[in-house]
Amino acid sequence: MKLHWSPKSPYVRKVMVCAHELGLAPRLELVRSVAAMLEPNERLMRDNPLSKIPTLVLENGFVLFDSAVICEYLNDLGESTAGTLFPKQGADKWQALRWHAFGDGLLDALILWRNEREREVPLPALIAAFEHKTRTALKQLDDEALALAETPFGIGHIALGCALGYIDYRFESLDWRNIAPRLAQWHAEINARPSFQQTEPLNG
């Protein structure tokens, strides 16, 4: 399988954490692909016309995107030997999917915040709105830290872990651990897993 990949993308990291957890990382051919908003990548667009990563090309040529779909596909591929990252039913299923959506939604806000921050003339009101959303999300997750710690590891933990890792990577000045100390303790534990250690984003 060919994965359009970047070591800096938190969505790619989510896929790679899943792949490591499921024992599938060796089966992925990583193709370094730049997906800049203002510069569509023509090579990438042959597989994904939206010019976004991650994009997974299967052995039969079928193409999967985005990260949520790819993670679920990998889970189906690897769960027979590694167990599942996606609970099948009941309250555990909906909690996992909610945390998955929470992590992806937080990442969406963070990336838009970073894009606005990098503009020649950022809009202060928009910067303030993204920061307010992020701080509120962190406080909500801090209230859920015990539930995260007590719930079996799955896709929701991966998505939230990658979102917090992206804050460390791109928003160090936010000092989020002072905003959410209980969440910080949970994150330290999850970040010690080999799958997270092996997918740390590169500087630059």
Image (cartoon, rainbow, N blue to C red):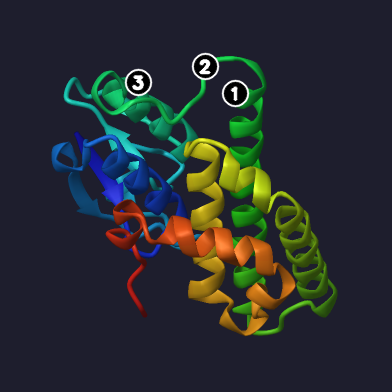
Q: Residues within 10 Å of mark 3 (few under 14, many from 20)?
A: some
**Do we see residue 38 in this rendering?**
no
Q: Is residue 3 left or right of residue 173?
A: left
Nearer the viewer's eye, disc 3 or disc 1? Answer: 1
Amino acid type of the residue that numbered disc 1 sits on in the rendered structure: Lys
Asked which quadrant contains residue 60, the reply is top left
Amino acid type of the residue that numbered disc 2 sits on in the rendered structure: Lys
- Secondary structure at badge 1 equals helix
Q: Residue at x 49, y 35 (%)?
A: 68
Which disc, if any, is residue 76? 3
Amino acid type of the residue that numbered disc 3 sits on in the rendered structure: Asp
Q: Quadrant of the N terminus?
A: top left
Q: Quick one: label 3 or label 1, which is nearer the N terminus?
A: 3
Which disc, if any, is residue 88? 2
147, 20: nearer the viewer: 147
Contact, mark 2 vs mark 1 (Cβ under 8 Å): yes
The residue labelled by disc 1 is 93
- Secondary structure at badge 2 equals loop
